[in-house]
Amino acid sequence: MANLEKTSREIQKQLRAMRLCYDVDTDYCDQASVGDAVRQRALCNDLAIVGPALLNDINLSPLVINGSLFDTGKPVLVVPEGAEATLSPRRVLVGWDSRVEASRSVREALDLLADAEEVRVALVDPEATCTGNGAEPGADIAAYLTRHGARVSVDRLASAGKPVATVLAQHAIDTSANMIVMGAYGSRRMRERLFGGVTRWIVGKPPLPLFLAR
């Protein structure tokens, strides 16, 4: 509790110096209650930011991410160590697969996408269909973003047998992206793959913030 109070005072000092309107809340609870405590606060916020210290805590990070992202539907910005925590990225890579989760991630990130210098919509092994991707995969979401003022290009990528997350992360690095925007899927298995796989991969390479919604 003493450490918690000390951290709270340090954060408040930083925020006062930045002359921001702020509120700092703390909760000293058992591990099983962490998700509920985070959920209660996330419901009344625009965005949860998960930094490197929490990402490195294998016990707490899943509880916080579940409470803020999966239990509320609010977006989360995952910031690995060495990444720049910003809501004004210059170049953004959007992972697109025509699913509801991907659509919500784009909608939640719309302001930062519209202000970015470049937005690249990336599709991995897309198939042209009457529904879903449409006759020209990526054209529909590119048009949507363009109508909102974003400067968009579409990249259709071949996986060559690699996991989709790996292909997207590598393409983000190859294109000098400052952030990845993508949907987070709801099953427990997909959650484990997302935060165990994608985040570790990004942390192991030049680090990039990951904007997620579902």
Image: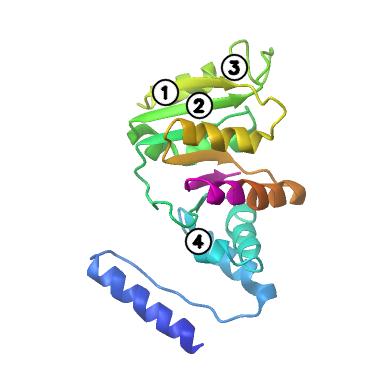
Amino acid found under the numbered disc labelled 1 = Val
- Is label 3 or label 4 in front? 4
Image vertical order of residue 65 relative to residue 11, above or below: above
Which dot marks residue 10? none
Q: Which residue is mark 3?
A: 137
Whichever of callouts 3 and 4 sits on the residue coming sooner in the sequence is: 4
* Residue 151 x %, y %: 37, 24
How far apart marks 2 and 4 lie (CA) works out to 26 Å
How far apart marks 3 and 4 lie (CA) works out to 35 Å
Amino acid found under the numbered disc labelled 3 = Pro
Q: Which residue is mark 2?
A: 121
Amino acid found under the numbered disc labelled 2 = Val
How far apart marks 1 and 4 lie (CA) works out to 30 Å
Q: Are marks 1 and 2 in contact (CB under 8 Å)?
A: yes
Span of residues in magenta: 199-214
Q: Which residue is mark 1?
A: 152
How far apart marks 1 and 2 lie (CA) works out to 7 Å
Amino acid found under the numbered disc labelled 4 = Pro
Q: Nearer the viewer, residue 192 or 170?
A: 170
Whichever of callouts 1 and 3 sits on the residue coming sooner in the sequence is: 3
Whichever of callouts 1 and 2 sits on the residue coming sooner in the sequence is: 2
Q: Are marks 1 and 4 in contact (CB under 8 Å)?
A: no
* Residue 31 x %, y %: 66, 75
Whichever of callouts 2 and 3 sits on the residue coming sooner in the sequence is: 2
Image vertical order of residue 134 relative to residue 194, above or below: above
Image vertical order of residue 157 relative to residue 20, above or below: above
Q: Residue at x 56, y 50 (%)?
A: 204
Give the secondary structure at mark 4.
Answer: helix
Give the secondary structure at mark 1.
Answer: strand
How far apart marks 2 and 3 lie (CA) works out to 10 Å
Whichever of callouts 2 and 4 sits on the residue coming sooner in the sequence is: 4
